[in-house]
Amino acid sequence: MRSLSRRDCLLLGGGALLPLPAGAEPVAKKRPLPLSTIFKGEARFEAMVKRAREEKWAELPVGERIVRFGKALEDLPYTNFTLEIDDRIESPSVNLNQLDCWTFFEQCLGLARMIGAPKERHEPADLLREIEFTRYRPGVCTGNHLERIHDLAEWFFENDARGTCRHLTPSLPGATRITGRKVTEMTTLWKSYRYLRNNPGLRPPMRELEKKIEQLPVHHIPKSRVAEIEPQLQSGDVIGIATKYNGAFCSHVGLILRTDDGVARFMHASRNFKKVVVDQSISGYLAEFSAHAGILVGRPLEVGETVTDPAVYQANLAKLLG
């Protein structure tokens, strides 16, 4: 995989699923945040990378690499809002000391992709580049909070088009489209989000983005059908937990870990357990929560499948939006 140039990233942004609203200019091209702010847990990073090198994780399939890193993060504390790192400047960030559900799956994916790209020595900047590519709508962050993908359903579309994670949900038995969903979490709960709380001008364009997300052709596997498709799930699959309530399409996210007993378990940063855990089967987990409607499924792809051609990306996205 070659790195995207700034020109490529701008082209990707021009064809992105949800381009930035008019007037939403980058806020901080010349003043990046310090590494101490955007990367926490450097000692843990070095230890995991050392172990991965010694045990030759790079030779494993990407899904297996993902769950190796997931297990290495097991028992780390759950903490809300770990992406809210500044009052104004948006930046790719990593926190390997405490995690929420999004940063857990995202950092496992980023680490697995990072070591899949051969290099004599991997550094924090390498992981930050992987996070930037998957977390931000244009594939690059210029400092604007509106560039970040905030809704997991959108993340599946964007990362499928970029060749980082195949969105399997629509092709699985029982897949059903979610209709009439109102996506309002960011603007309804703006006081909970540091960037929106400190920048009132971001709220109207954020609402416009939410309206566009509402129109996405989002499918889920209803929880009554999840046991049926469990045999098809693989270690490392990204599992979005669909909610039955308005506000967002998904309320939680984690990974599949297929254990030695053959069970497709849900591995996630759990608010209930207050840490990263390997939970029960995904169907069993869903059954415990009345608000959970079902799942979305994504299968991470090898780094060599990453899309760097803007025309291919746009064609992929058009096909996904059908």
Image (cartoon, grey):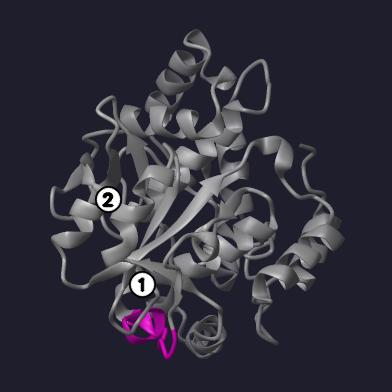
**Residue type, numbered disc 1:** Tyr
Q: In which quarter of the image is residue 314?
A: bottom right
**Residue type, numbered disc 2:** Ile
Could you say where residue 322 lies in the image, as x and y percent from the top left?
A: 69, 76
- The structure residue drawn at horizontal position 59% and vertical position 24%, both measured from the top left corner, is 122
- Which element type, helix, strand or loop, lies under badge 1? loop
What residue sits right under mark 1 in the picture?
A: 193
What residue sits right under mark 2 in the picture?
A: 282
Nearer-N-terminus badge (1/2): 1
Q: Does the magenta stretch include residue 183?
A: yes
- The structure residue drawn at horizontal position 41% and vertical position 57%, both measured from the top left corner, is 83
- Which element type, helix, strand or loop, lies under badge 2? helix
Could you say where residue 162 lies in the image, as x and y percent from the top left?
A: 69, 55
Q: In which quarter of the image is residue 43?
A: top left
Residue bounds of the magenta highlight: 179-190
- Identify whether 288 is placed above or below 280: below
- The structure residue drawn at horizontal position 57% and vertical position 85%, both measured from the top left corner, is 212
Horizontal arrangement in the rendering, residue 63 relative to residue 292 (left or right): right
Horizontal arrangement in the rendering, residue 303 relative to residue 227 (left or right): right
- The structure residue drawn at horizontal position 27% and vertical position 58%, both measured from the top left corner, is 80
Horizontal arrangement in the rendering, residue 129 relative to residue 63 (left or right): right
Quick one: label 1, few (<14), some, or many (20+) residues within 10 Å? some
